[in-house]
Amino acid sequence: MRHLILFLAFSIATLSAQEQKIITKEDNNTFKVVYLNEDGNISQQGFIKNNKLHGKWSSFNKTGIKIISGQYKKGKKVGKWIFRNEGKVKEVEYADNTIINVVDWDTPVIIATVND
């Protein structure tokens, strides 16, 4: 659990000096924030409302694959966050920025198949 908390803290807070930040105004109190990595690909994106993280937030690896997705409400993590790492998926449920449940999805699950 300690490693997960450290990973979560660094995943959103750590940005290299070469990354760029693009901010666009959505309405009077809401801004969309997009961080680009040194290759120009999106590394993180989300929203800030009333100077706090609010709404959907996503992080991507260097190849553009989404590795973290979740929601903020007034600067605090809420609801289910999904973390993908090396083929494994971790579902972390938050209430008011506090972890209340963690589910590891180590084995891939087939949700549906398409037959030609």
Image: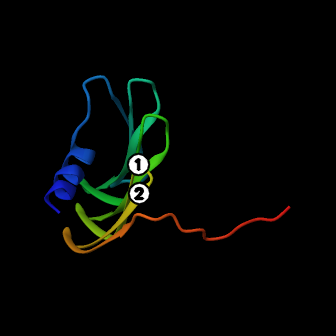
Q: Which residue is mark 2?
A: 88
Mark 2: which secondary structure? Answer: strand
Q: Residue at x 21, y 44 (%)?
A: 13
* Res. 6 mark: none
Q: Residue at x 71, y 67 (%)?
A: 113
| Left or right: where 10 falls relative to 80 | left
Can residue 32 be seen here? The reply is no
Q: Which residue type does callout 2 highlight?
A: Lys
Asked if the residue under mark 2 is in contact with the one under mark 1, i.e. CB atoms within 8 Å, the reply is yes
Where residue 12 sits in the image (x, y, percent)? 26, 47
Return the residue nearer the eye: 34 or 14.
14
Q: Which residue is mark 1?
A: 86
Return the residue nearer the eye: 21 or 40.
40
Q: Quadrant of the C terminus?
A: bottom right
Mark 1–mark 2 Cα distance, whole angstroms, equals 6 Å
Where residue 11 sits in the image (x, y, percent)? 27, 46
Q: Which residue type does callout 1 highlight?
A: Glu
Mark 2, other Cα within 10 Å: few <14 / some 14–19 / many ≥20: few
Name above or below for residue 67 compared with residue 20.
below
Where residue 22 sits in the image (x, y, percent)? 39, 35
Return the residue nearer the eye: 96 or 14.
14
Q: Residue at x 38, y 24 (%)?
A: 38
